[in-house]
Amino acid sequence: MKISKALLPRKLKEFILRILEIKKEASSKSFDLYYHLRFSFKEHNLKDDQAQFKYYLTKHYHIVEKGLALPEPRLGFGQPKIADIIEKAQRYESLFGSDELTASIRKTLKEYIAFNSAQNFELPIQFENLLSEFIQQGNTGNSGGLKDKKKNTSSTLTLDEYKDFAIGRTSVRNFSEEPVSIDLLYKAADIAKNAPSVCNRQGWKIHCYSDKNTIINLLSYQNGNAGFTHTINKLLIVTADVKAFTNFESNQAFIDGGLFSMNLLLAIHAAGLGACCLNTCYPSSKEKEVKTAAAIPDNERLIMMIAVGNLKNDFSVAYSPRNPTEQIFVPH
Ligand SMILES: Cc1cc2nc3c(=O)[nH]c(=O)nc-3n(C[C@H](O)[C@H](O)[C@H](O)COP(=O)(O)O)c2cc1C
């Protein structure tokens, strides 16, 4: 017998709706888990997948880089880890050839030897030979290891200057008709990539769309662009590659992707353009549809869309007041 919804008591209706919501949330979480298990790299069972391999190597050689950047690095630290990096880097080069990553690993290991030798610390001879042979097998490149910094040039802005700049960024939902230069967005991406990420993994990507029909189609899946869709000149979709992450890092895609997106928004603001984040809070089936329509590979998760346009000479933005700082800053 079918009972009409209207006849159900209010409490029972609320209960059924809650159960349905919990079911949807659980399905969305199992989707997260499915993606994480399917695409993340496995520390103890690394597959011959170039992207996963790169992320693994980046994670591990960065441990040496940051070890060297400590106030008092432990002499001869990390030998078993370094032997593993060398073994994996050689396997990587035999499969995919040498590149900037393997050059950075070599530069870092060269600095590791130099650090120990400057402290008159003798590495075990077999280990030192392993390092030297690996270093000689390829280029050392210019990046990796340490770079020197000076306190007085570490920041080029005062806090007040940064405050003016950061407060000057607001979401813009009313753009001029002037097209946005792709080159400018490329430059913004080039700056945004300096965002921090877990062990320097940099699993982020920006997909940039210029074609009006494509933009309108992609925005038809999104629920927060009504009223300004037609004024959007470029649509960016920020994603994070699940292959960049490993055990207990399933949330990291969204953390690193969010940090990167903020850096990108500030760079777009510095470029004199306007932007508005557009949420990608989708159920799993819709995320798949959007990725297909946007030609985004399945191993990437959607972080957010960003609508971009040029600014009009005069325009209004939502005030979006902020909560008092004493409510968010909790000294302990
Ligand atoms: C991840 C994310 C998703 C957002 N989605 C939308 C959206 O779909 N539509 C919209 O108009 N604004 C969206 N916003 C913009 C927020 O409403 C806005 O950032 C907030 O009100 C603060 O205002 P401000 O950006 O002007 O400082 C989003 C912001 C973020 C960070």
Image (cartoon, rainbow, N blue to C red):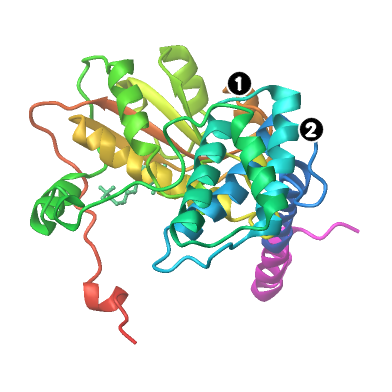
Residue 59 in view (yes/no): yes
Q: Residue at x 20, y 35 (%)?
A: 270
Residue 28 in view (yes/no): no
Q: Mark 1 — residue?
A: 295
Q: Mark 2 — residue?
A: 48
Q: Secondary structure at mark 2?
A: loop
Q: Is residue 203 above or below residue 93?
A: below
The N terminus - image quarter: bottom right
Of callouts 1 and 2, the N-terminal one: 2
- Please count the marks in the image: 2
Q: Amino acid at mark 2?
A: Asp
Secondary structure of the magenta portion, mostly?
helix
Q: Is residue 178 magenta?
A: no
Residue 63, image quadrant: bottom right
Cα distance in 3D space between marks 1 and 2: 24 Å
Image x and y of residue 200, in percent: 50, 47
Q: Residue at x 13, y 58 (%)?
A: 159
Residue 38, image quadrant: top right
Left or right for 234, reference 174: right
Q: Nearer the viewer, residue 18 or 224?
A: 224
